[in-house]
Amino acid sequence: MIAPSILSADFARLSEEMAAVGGPGRGADWLHVDVMDAHFVPNLTLGLPVVESLLRSTDTPLDCHLMIDAPDRWAPGYAEAGAHNVTVHAEAAEDPVALAKNLRAAGAKAGLSVKPDTPLESYTDVLKHYDTLLVMSVEPGFGGQKFIERVLEKVRAARRMVDTGHLNLLVEIDGGINSDTIEQAAEAGVDCFVAGSAVYGAEDPVRAVEGLRARALDTSAHGSA
């Protein structure tokens, strides 16, 4: 799965930018929406009112990544608005198990994200309540950062737990994904790849999405052969 990140899109033309990669024959499985509050991370992007507008502008499922403080309070609103997948940060959630239940009750899939230096082992039991694990391969807060290769150990650990039945979730990665790094991530066991500048910085975003998907599928096929 490929989830183009609209953080790298033209914010003055978000509806058009989403339509460029989403919809029938356009390639994107999800559209990744980074919500930042200038507290949990130093940057500030957009919030629930903008997401509500985005939901009215596309039929492509929105993958909302909340890099915010107090997600226990704010995250269910994104699920209630109609976001397909709502991801909160393990480092910010007060009661991640209860939060996962609230997100699911509001109609969304529940995602848990971990920063590059956050150990996965601390959240193994918590992840049993989640649908998605988002492994950050850059420090959250800014686009265009360099891929941190060491996080792939966490991806491999999560993949083993999924393959052995200890967890039942989708493994997603976010940060520095491009035509080179997607192969490493696919080999480690990622299911869903968030890509920003690699898609929206390309001359043909749809072709970029399909190129990324082809590289991931080719790597996965060789890895399972």
Image (cartoon, rainbow, N blue to C red):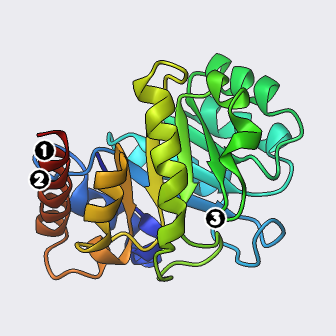
Alpha carbons under labels 3 and 2: distance apart: 26 Å
Disc 2 residue crowd, few under 14, some 14–19, many 20+, Cα 10 Å: some
Alpha carbons under labels 1 and 3: distance apart: 27 Å
Disc 3 residue crowd, few under 14, some 14–19, many 20+, Cα 10 Å: some
Of residues 25 and 173, the one drawn nearer to the viewer in this rendering: 173
Asked if labels 1 and 2 touch by Cβ distance under 8 angstroms, the answer is yes
Q: Which mark is residue 218?
A: 2
Quadrant in which the C terminus is drawn: top left
Is 175 located above or below residue 64 in the figure?
below
Disc 1 residue crowd, few under 14, some 14–19, many 20+, Cα 10 Å: few
Q: Of the residues shown, which amino acid type is indicated by label 1?
A: Ala
Quadrant in which the N terminus is drawn: top left
Q: Is residue 198 visible?
A: yes
Of residues 179 and 34, the one drawn nearer to the viewer in this rendering: 179
Q: What residue does disc 3 label?
A: 116
Q: Of the residues shown, which amino acid type is indicated by label 2?
A: Asp
Which SS class for mark 1?
helix
Is 143 located above or below residue 154 in the figure?
below
Of residues 182 and 201, the one drawn nearer to the viewer in this rendering: 182
Picture coordinates of residue 95, whole percent (x, y): 86, 33
